[in-house]
Image (tube, rainbow, N blue to C red):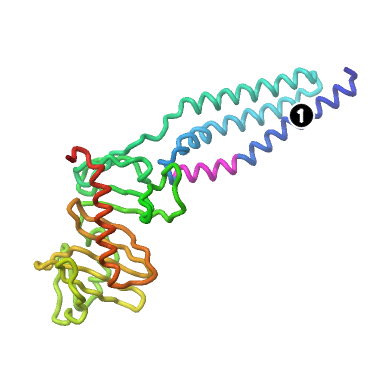
Amino acid sequence: MQPTQQTHLKNNLLRISWLIFVILILLSTYLIALAVGAHYHPNSRTAPYIVAITTIYPIILLASLLLAVCLSLARKRLSAKAMNQAIFRTYAMLGLGVVATMLLVKPVPAYFVQHVGNVPYRIPREFTGIQSNQPSPDSAVRIDLCLETFQGKYSTHPEDCRTSIVILSQRLISVESFNMSYFFDNSDVFSNVDDQIQMTAEADKYQVKSFNGLRSYIASLNSSNKSYFQIDESNNLIRFASCHGGCVSFVKTSIGTLQYPYQTGGFSTSNFEEWVSMEKKLVKLISSWRIGAS
């Protein structure tokens, strides 16, 4: 090969080495976005692989930079063949390292054991955005699903549906709901102590038709927010819903305090039956995951 051809080929190889480095730099911005997604969605199938590749990616960038710098400094002393071999071997080794890393990645477990107090539930990976927790009075189960289809957030073929967060705990409704605490703290008619409701004589004007054998009330502190709650014959709070366009509902069930959103165009007492229907479905679903349930 003529010296002029050698020089031309070496210059092209040098450009290629720097071009690869620039491409890797640009690709890193995309990987950062993927890493952020994996951080907030650790239970997605791709999350552990994204974490693995972003962990070794700085090594890939450093090796690519060192290769380009070394070829630039040694361009006059190296032949075109030697430069070509250096580029090929470097990226072949990096590629094998990436493959080995991917093969060593442990996939996300199929289930996570979460607790409601001390009661364990085996939650499928597709249905939760958090992982396992330890039993304690404050422990809760969190599931992420589409309330229209009851598909989990990380299902293989999720339908186009807004994901809702549903929480089951053993805590009082007044502990779970900030809106409820705010409502009772600022109401002149109703007050609450540990989910026990006291009220003045004016409470009758807020009462609506009883539902499911529970006394029902609708009240509001302003024109845009309405609060709906139900109490039993002993004035124990059974349900509280704060509504502003959609509603966030808290209800005591046979397995604990259930919190879930109910998206609707506006508040209406016609929602009551739909709420109860939704709660029965959620209780049935979560109960099916209880460890040791008959």
Left or right of residue 277, residue 87 in this image: right
Magenta stretch, overall SS: helix
Relative horizontal placement of residue 205, taking residue 75 as reference (left or right):
left
Along the viewing direction, whichever of 155 and 164 lies nearer the viewer: 155
Q: Is 26 placed left or right of 280 in the picture? A: right
**Residue drawn at the location 70% of the way across and 21% of the way down:** 86
Q: Residues within 10 Å of mark 1 (few under 14, many from 20)?
A: many
On the image, the x and y values in percent for residue 10 come to 81, 25
Is 175 located above or below residue 13 in the figure?
below
**Disc 1 target residue:** 14
Taking depth in this image into account, of 132 and 46 the one nearest to the observer is 46
Specify whether residue 99 is painted magenta. Answer: no
Residue at 65 percent of width and 30 percent of height: 64
> Could you tell me residue 149's position as x and y percent?
38, 52
Q: Residue at x 85, y 27 (%)?
A: 8
Q: Quadrant of residue 134?
A: top left
Chain part drawn in magenta: 28-39
Q: Position of residue 195 (x, y in %)?
A: 17, 63
Q: Kindly indicate the quadrant of the structure image that contains residue 84.
A: top right
In the picture, the quarter occupied by the C terminus is top left
Residue at image x 13%, y 66%?
232
Q: Examine the image and state in which quarter residue 113 appears.
A: top left
Q: Is residue 246 left or right of residue 98?
A: left
Please state which of residues 77 and 2 is positioned toward the viewer in this rendering. 2
Please state, as top left, top right, bottom left or bottom right, where the N terminus lies in the image.
top right
Residue 55 at x, y percent in the picture: 51, 33
Amino acid type shown at disc 1? Leu
Vertical order, 282 against 55 (above or below) = below
Decide which of 144, 270 is in the foreground and name it: 270
Q: Secondary structure at mark 1?
A: helix
Q: Is residue 52 above or below residue 183?
A: above
Residue 38 shown in magenta: yes
